[in-house]
């Protein structure tokens, strides 16, 4: 109900009643101000999500403080020397690329002008060349023999390489191309259909879809050993992303989920730090229930980096899994407020404190875990102690339900998890490692829009797991897929772990 105006005649006369009336009006004003701030924050977030850039960077962020404020300013990042420089527009050409030599010589008429001619060298230049893909047909010829043994006649045929998909005329190379086009290059099947048509072959998108799903289901056999490898990692990350699902018989999509898990880190063996080859696994789920990560991580022991989603709390109850907070999530809350403010305030100052922490991480990123641990203990912990004192000092005067108070409250409530990354050099300050692997899903979702069935969603989870792991281990996806699809139909089931896209 909207407030009504109060006339002078309606004001109480008694001093005590007048004071109580004034306090009540002040309380109502504070409530309305909180509601106004919250609405303005929601509008700013909606406008940024629809029209703004995705980068979480504020112009002039390094100059947010006045000298009189006596607040910490992050050190300037160390300058990295550049060993070489190429002119703009002239990309460096890798020495690993195959090369074709074309020689140019003077013709006979030009040579006849001179009395003598002796070649003393050559001038070399290079151009980058592209040859478009082409479709070919491979004929598999199996020789047949009429044979006799022990007086009996029979017919024997030579064995051929088994097809990846029975009753299909798609080669491993074509299936790999379809999968890479879909899950790496984010191409919907209608665009792939047009591409193949330009090469003179009509492949209906329904056929492409079936091949894509069947190939992903063939590759599912790699997921159990991939999970087993991943769950041995000293550090795990968990997060989820939406997946619109349009099922048969429905006119609109419903929101399902892909839960992502990333395992990585280093272990000390014989006095040296050894990398655990990173692996990412995505699992399709109908909901965002905390039961999904609880089931997946039920046997895991180690550090788990995650946001402060309440559904994760059951993971930490046994003590086998140690919670590590995410500074990127914490920072994002202050960033949304600072971005909407015309004049830098407390949110911008909080960003500056967090920038100091990331400046330390930037300097030690390439060092060994023991050096990172020592640097965090001596450099990051003092900054964190001052930051917490600053948060507690300013949180007192904030309106309880305002966006800024919620950002301060998030940081203080989850402080123990947020600072835990300083306890071990194998840990990271945020969950960005997994968020980078979720990014291709978001790009694909913007192109193919939705999964048309749970079968399609499970295929997407399988392929984003395998191709994401290949990317983490710097393995070229098409070559790995073609080789794996060629081998898999006849590969021993007990040795399929040898085909995983992991760094050896």
Image: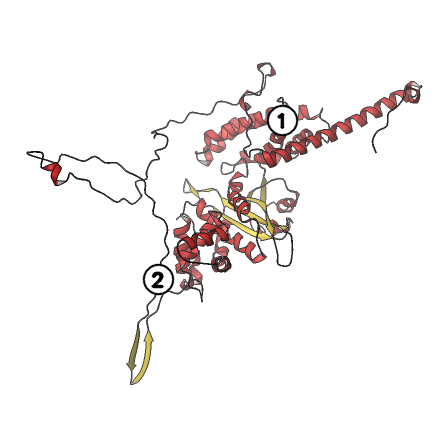
Which of the two marks, 2 or 1, is nearer to us in this view?
A: 2
Mark with earlier residue (2, 1): 2
**Secondary structure of the residue carrying numbered label 1:** helix
Left or right: 336, with 35 as reference point: left
Looking at the picture, does residue 255 appear above or below residue 332? Answer: below
Q: Residue at x 53, y 26 (%)?
A: 356
Query: Residue 458, percent across and down?
Result: 55, 55
**Secondary structure of the residue carrying numbered label 2:** loop
Give the Cα distance between marks 2 and 1: 63 Å
State the residue lying farthest toward the left: 115
Q: Which mark is drawn over residue 347? A: 1
Left or right: 369, with 311 as reference point: left
Q: Residue at x 45, y 67 (%)?
A: 167
Q: Which mark is drawn over residue 138? A: 2
State the residue lying farthest toward the bottom: 151
Q: Residue at x 65, y 45 (%)?
A: 311
Looking at the picture, does residue 159 appear above or below residue 38? Answer: below
């Amino acid at each position: 109900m909207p407030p009504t105006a109060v006339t002078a005649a309606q004001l109480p006369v008694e001093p005590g009643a007048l004071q109580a009336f004034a306090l009540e009006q002040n309380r109502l004003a504070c409530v309305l101000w909180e509601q106004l701030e919250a609405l303005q924050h929601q509008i700013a977030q909606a406008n940024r999500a629809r029209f703004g850039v995705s980068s979480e960077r504020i112009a002039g962020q390094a100059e947010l403080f006045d000298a009189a404020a006596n607040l910490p300013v992050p050190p300037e990042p160390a300058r990295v020397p550049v060993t070489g420089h190429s002119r703009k527009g002239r990309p460096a050409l890798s020495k690993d690329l195959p090369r074709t030599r074309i020689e140019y010589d003077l013709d006979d008429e030009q040579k006849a002008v001179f009395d003598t001619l002796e070649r003393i060298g050559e001038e070399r230049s290079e151009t980058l060349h592209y040859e478009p893909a082409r479709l070919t047909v491979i004929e598999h010829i199996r020789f047949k023999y009429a044979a006799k043994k022990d007086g009996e006649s029979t017919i024997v045929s030579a064995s051929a390489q088994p097809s990846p998909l029975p009753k299909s005329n798609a080669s491993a190379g074509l299936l790999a191309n379809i999968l890479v086009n879909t899950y790496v290059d984010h191409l919907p099947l209608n665009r792939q259909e047009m591409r193949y048509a330009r090469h003179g072959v009509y492949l209906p998108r329904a056929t492409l879809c079936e091949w894509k799903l069947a190939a992903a289901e063939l590759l599912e056999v790699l997921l159990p050993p991939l999970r087993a490898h991943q769950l041995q990692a000293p550090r795990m990350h968990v997060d989820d992303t939406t997946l619109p699902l349009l099922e048969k018989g429905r006119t609109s999509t419903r929101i399902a989920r892909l839960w992502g898990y990333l395992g990585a880190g280093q272990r000390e063996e014989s006095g040296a730090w050894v990398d655990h080859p990173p692996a990412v696994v995505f699992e399709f789920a109908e909901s965002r229930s905390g039961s999904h990560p609880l089931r997946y991580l039920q046997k895991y022991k180690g550090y788990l980096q995650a946001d402060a989603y309440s559904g994760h709390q059951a993971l930490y109850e046994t003590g086998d899994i140690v919670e590590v907070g995410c500074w990127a999530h914490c920072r994002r809350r202050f960033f949304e407020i600072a971005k909407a403010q015309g004049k830098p305030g407390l949110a911008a100052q909080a960003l500056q404190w967090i920038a100091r922490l990331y400046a330390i991480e930037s300097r030690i990123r390439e060092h060994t875990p023991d050096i990172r641990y020592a640097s965090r203990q001596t450099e990051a912990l003092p900054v964190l102690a001052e930051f917490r004192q600053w948060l507690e000092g300013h949180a007192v005067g904030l309106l309880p339900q305002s966006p800024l108070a919620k950002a301060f409250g998030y940081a203080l409530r989850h402080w123990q998890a947020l600072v835990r990354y300083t306890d071990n050099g194998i840990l990271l300050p945020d969950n960005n490692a997994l968020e980078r692997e979720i990014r291709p899903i978001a790009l694909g979702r913007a192109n193919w829009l939705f999964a048309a069935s749970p079968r399609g969603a499970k295929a997407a989870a399988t392929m984003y797991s395998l191709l994401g792991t290949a990317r983490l281990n710097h393995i070229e996806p098409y070559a790995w897929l073609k080789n794996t699809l060629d081998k898999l139909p006849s590969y021993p089931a007990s040795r399929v772990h040898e085909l995983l896209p992991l760094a050896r």
